[in-house]
Amino acid sequence: MPKKILIFSLAYYPSNVSGAEAAIKEITDRIKDIEFHLITLRLDKDALSREKIGNVVVYRVGVGSLYLSKILFIPLSALKARNLHKEIKFSAIWAMMTYMLIPTVITKFIGVKIPHIITLQDGDPYEKVFSRIRILPALPIIDYGFRSAKIIQTISVFLSEWPRKRGYKGEIELIYNGGNPRDLRDTVSADEIEDTKKKLGKKEGDIFLVNTSRLVHQKGFDTTIRALVTLPSNIKFLIVGSGSDEKKLKDLTKELKLEDRVIFAGQVDRNIVTLYRRASDIFIAPSRSEGLGNAFISALASRLPLIATRVGGMADYVFDEKTAWVIDPDKPEQIAEKVKAILANPEKVKKISEYARKMVEDKYDWDKIALQMREKVFAKVV
């Protein structure tokens, strides 16, 4: 009989997918000797309450993405976990990100006496994450969750500093997230790329800057939009994704009279987003904070030149003129300078892009990551 692990994740496939959700799926799809079950928030009222996705049985509780729904998710998910455990007999709980420690600890308090592990993938700065959860008794519950964890896995050096600040004295495993497999395996054809360029209206001579992240303040999309003002008119910005800042960004685009140079492609399936990167010329990542930045690693896997900050976990792989072109946050003029430098030095770009691609193959491949998770993390609790 395979061992069974219960996962708590606030969101999951098929919608509301970001780096954390992609990590769960990429890892669990590659581990066949463990049975994974996952409890998540039912963000879409039409979503199934139970379904199997890959190697994960998914259970959805509650309805809605509003703050109240997220609060109600805590007791509902804990009760669901207890009921499932009576039948399934889990070996351990896997909490995906800091907030999921709350249902994890409550589940243990109400009778599910099994070890838990934590994966830290938080993208916001430490101070912001913990200022949001200072409501009593949330913070003591989370701190207890940190202190009592069997093992904590982090995806960057930046996040590896957090557990000690919360009183954890145990083992910390640094295991990175990976790049999109389609980018790493080079599985897209030249015809697919050309079709995507036509779909996006890319004309001969156009240069596409691109970012395929969530449209939120921390990602710095507004900085790139402002950079266009000082760049030639053939340089355009392709925004792939959705998020809470979408209206603000569209308003800024209109205010700066850049409607013909900023393309809002909307949310795109993760298997298709590779084509949008390959149809582009330069990836721009002026983030204000990051846990790691999966999309940016995927850009390097695609051999795209990357203009990026070195905030948070990005410092693990963004090295100036070695793997990327480094800028400071909130500096549109620096983006413009780096774009011009990249366009003026194609041989240098090729050399840096190939070096970055090799780094991704060595350190950010999901096959290697899943093996590390199985041997260094899950083996400690199953």
Image: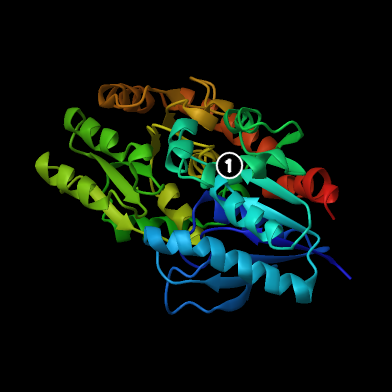
**Left or right of 350, for residue 78:** right
Residue at x 61%, y 77% (from the top left corner) = 51
**Left or right of 211, for residue 348:** right
Quadrant for the C terminus, please. bottom right
**Left or right of 183, for residue 268:** left
User: Above or below — where is 159 with respect to 96?
Assistant: above
Dot 1 amino acid type? Pro
Of residues 190 and 268, the one nearer the viewer is 268
Q: Secondary structure at mark 1?
A: helix
Residue at which label 1 appears: 140
Q: Quadrant of residue 252?
A: top left
Quadrant for the N terminus, please. bottom right
Of residues 69 and 223, the one nearer the viewer is 69
Q: Quadrant of residue 305?
A: top left
What percent of the width, then of the height, locates residue 144?
65, 42
Residue at x 53%, y 57% (from the top left corner) = 188
Of residues 189 and 339, the one nearer the viewer is 339
User: Above or below — where is 62 with respect to 105?
Assistant: below
What percent of the width, then of the height, locates residue 74?
54, 60
Residue at x 33%, y 36% (from the top left corner) = 220
Q: Is residue 350 visible?
A: no
Q: Residues within 10 Å of mark 1 (few under 14, many from 20)?
A: some
User: Above or below — where is 275 with respect to 35?
Assistant: above
What percent of the width, then of the height, locates residue 355?
59, 29
